[in-house]
Amino acid sequence: MAKVAFLGLGVMGYPMAGHLKAHGHDVTVYNRTPAKAASWVAEHSGKSAPTPRAAAEGQDLIFACVGNDDDLRSVTIGPDGAFAAMATGAIFVDHTTASADVARELYTSAKKLGLGFVDAPVSGGQAGAQNGVLTVMCGGDASDYAKAEPVIQSYARSCRLLGDAGAGQLTKMVNQICIAGLVQGLSEGLHFATQAGLDAEAVIEVISKGAAQSWQMENRYKTMLAGKFDFGFAVDWMRKDLGICLAESRRNGAHLPVTALVDQFYSEVQTMGGGRWDTSSLLARLNK
């Protein structure tokens, strides 16, 4: 059993912290909105703390899943940040989807304090978090990863160290780039099938047995055809992630024409009022 803190109890962090408690770890939570922390404590018979610093004190591992780079800095550095209370040798594991730059920045800050830092963004969405089957992609020192990995397994189906600090975030960027193209292709296919007068469900049932098959096709085509877009990762968050991808590509020279185009399509979905719709709502833009 490890003594751990979990910072950030959103749609991902709330169930992830729950899995840690269910696997026997001693869990203290922090959330910017205290009511959410109180709800988690009531449900899981855990503990909460008023600040990231208070949550991190005396813990072996501190996990975080917050919104963006600035949110991550707010829970790590400064007088109320977790770094101020972490003991030498303690490890901070960041599950936020953030930039590789902030991962490297916080890794360097942590090392100067004698702390470990692993950037560990996740894939699998809200359902993956609730079911404890997330994919976790990590960057950092092998020794820190080796200590954190058995605890991460509380909510992971797959977990792997991909390289030095920032490698986890770069891998998550690859993940989002691939998803963006897949969802746009699926949306166009469904739109085309409908416009052609085909039975779109029958079409998908056939082509999903061949090379066109994907997770998005298997799990989203029925809700997409029904015009229901409340089943996962929100467009607002996808645009944040694709912005990170595009900014990184400008630094490393990668060419991402499809990603840039799909990002603009998502901006149109936002204009339609779909910022909180899930990412499969690209179809709504074609059908408007």
Image: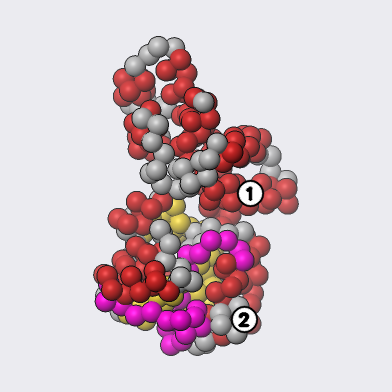
The quarter of the picture where the N terminus appears is: bottom left
**In the displayed structure, would residue 215 be above or below residue 37?**
above
Q: CA distance from mark 2 to mark 1?
A: 27 Å
> Which residue is painted at 50% across and 79% down in the image?
52
Tell me the residue that label 1 is attached to: 243
Residue positioned 39% across, 71% down in the render: 35
Image x and y of residue 77, in percent? 60, 78
Q: Can residue 90 be seen in this snapshot? A: no
Indicate which disc, 2 or 1, sits on the residue closer to the N terminus. 2
Q: Which residue is the extreme one toward the top?
A: 197
**Residue 75 bears which disc, if any?**
none
* Magenta segment boundaries in residue numbering: 44-70
Q: Are marks 2 and 1 in contact (CB under 8 Å)?
A: no
Classify 246 as above or below 40: above
The answer to which image quadrant residue 181 occupies is top right
155 vs 5, nearest the viewer: 5
Please tell me whether residue 137 is drawn above or below residue 188 in the rendered image: below
Neighbourhood count class around disc 2 (C-alpha, 10 Å): few under 14, some 14–19, many 20 upward? few
Q: Which residue is mark 2?
A: 78
The residue under the point 48% across, 30% down is 283
149 in magenta: no
